[in-house]
């Protein structure tokens, strides 16, 4: 009997990462997507390929799937699903919960698996489901952490370019049974694992995205290999690795291996990715439990000098204003105070705003290293 999976979200992670594991494990896939144009393309073409950056394996054919929108009748596909996965962004899990509750009784929920960035997206989905069902949810909401880069291949309708990543960690405590994916690794205490990823891997990704954007890079690997950006990465890891090792009660060697693997990936010029794509949603990424402010607090609490994170926050504010802001005027201090609920005299706010102002005043000639040293002197 064919196993059936539903994937909420047919973007780069949904069809370029989750679909590969599902295909290799023998699942028939139904994508649920808000973008009607994308749904029509999937149903018209009926297949697409996942290619790999290093050409280290044969492209994977994804076929025998179907695609629906949230407005379609999802009753039968949800009731028949053996597993439901999400790749929609943590902020959209409320809509997923509402969709599930519309068609399924609480006792009909199959295994759920989130594939989102955040410190605990499974908990977010569980809480939203508990609101919908007005009661507790049994142990069927698990999560994974994505370490794989994927992009759409330009000039194709649906094809994906992906890293050949076979590591698929998942939350054992939220999973009923075991996951039959190749490379699946069940982990306990997944929230700490997720936090470590956010505070290491995503912290570095944020630094590269926002500092790379300020320096005018479009390609992610080029930004990572920039002399100034690379120097700041090295400076950060000298203090961040021992702080995180102590924070998570792991060996420094283990933390350094984890961080070095991330840097190696980010510097790999064959892994094509984009600065603006990785900088998306800066308001969320500036949040208290996210990749910029949380590592800043960990560094401060371990008696380390954390000005680098203020530089990154200032660059994120520049990105926010220039790429995503839709208002008539932009006040960086007001933005940070609203996001973080801090006092205007908080050192993080003051130094981050100072970094923003310096970048804006010296947009074409800014030196990140000189700015960092200047902020340290303030």
Image: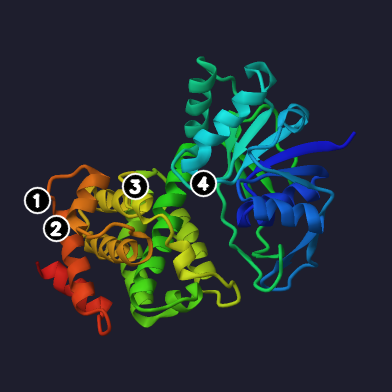
Q: Mark 3 highlights which residue?
A: 246
Cα separation between marks 4 and 1: 33 Å
The tag earlier along the polypeptide, 2 or 1, is 1
At 58% from the left and 45% from the top, the residue drawn is 115
Quarter in which the C terminus is drawn: bottom left
Q: Give the percent coordinates (x, y) of residue 334.
A: 19, 52
Label 1 residue SS? loop
Q: Give the percent coordinates (x, y) of residue 300.
A: 21, 51
Specify few, some or many for label 1: CA neighbours under 10 Å numbering under 14, 14-19, or 20 or more. few
The tag earlier along the polypeptide, 3 or 1, is 3
Specify few, some or many for label 3: CA neighbours under 10 Å numbering under 14, 14-19, or 20 or more. some
The tag earlier along the polypeptide, 2 or 4, is 4
Please tell me whether mark 4 or mark 1 is closer to you in this view.
4
Cα separation between marks 3 and 1: 29 Å
- In the drawing, what numbered circle is on residue 55? none
- In the drawing, what numbered circle is on residue 345? 1
At 34% from the left and 52% from the top, the residue drawn is 283
């Amino acid at each position: 009997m064919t196993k059936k999976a539903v994937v909420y979200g047919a973007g780069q992670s949904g069809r370029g990462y989750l679909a590969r594991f599902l295909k290799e494990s023998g699942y028939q896939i139904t994508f649920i997507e808000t973008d009607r144009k994308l749904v029509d393309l999937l149903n018209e073409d009926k297949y697409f390929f996942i290619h790999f950056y290093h050409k280290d394996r044969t492209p994977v054919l994804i076929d025998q799937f179907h695609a629906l929108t949230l407005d379609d009748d999802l009753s039968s596909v949800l009731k028949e699903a053996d597993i439901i996965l999400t790749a929609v962004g943590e902020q959209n899990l409320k809509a997923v919960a509402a969709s599930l509750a519309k068609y399924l009784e609480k006792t009909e929920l199959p295994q759920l698996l989130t594939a989102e960035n955040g410190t605990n997206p499974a908990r977010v989905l569980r809480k939203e489901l508990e609101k919908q069902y007005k009661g507790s949810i049994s142990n069927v909401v698990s999560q994974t952490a994505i370490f794989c880069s994927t992009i759409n291949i330009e000039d194709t309708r649906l094809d994906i370019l992906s890293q050949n990543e076979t590591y698929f960690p998942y939350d054992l405590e939220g999973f009923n049974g075991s996951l039959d994916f190749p490379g699946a690794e069940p982990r306990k205490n997944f929230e700490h694992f997720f936090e470590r990823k956010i505070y290491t891997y995503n912290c570095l990704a944020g630094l590269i995205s926002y500092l790379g954007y300020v320096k005018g890079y479009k390609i992610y690997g080029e930004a990572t290999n920039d002399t100034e950006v690379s120097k700041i990465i090295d400076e950060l890891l000298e203090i961040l690795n021992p702080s995180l090792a102590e924070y998570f009660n792991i060996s420094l060697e283990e933390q350094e291996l984890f961080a070095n693997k991330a840097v190696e990936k980010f510097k790999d010029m064959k892994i094509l990715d984009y600065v603006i794509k990785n900088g998306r949603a800066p308001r969320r990424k500036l949040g208290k439990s996210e990749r910029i402010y949380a590592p800043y607090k960990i560094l401060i609490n371990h008696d380390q000098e954390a000005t680098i994170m203020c530089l990154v926050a200032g660059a994120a504010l520049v990105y926010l204003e220039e790429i995503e802001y839709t208002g008539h005027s932009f006040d960086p201090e007001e933005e940070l105070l609203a996001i973080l609920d801090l006092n205007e005299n908080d050192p993080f706010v003051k130094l981050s705003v100072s970094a923003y102002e310096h970048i804006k005043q010296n947009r074409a000639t800014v030196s990140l290293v000189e700015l960092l040293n200047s902020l340290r002197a303030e």
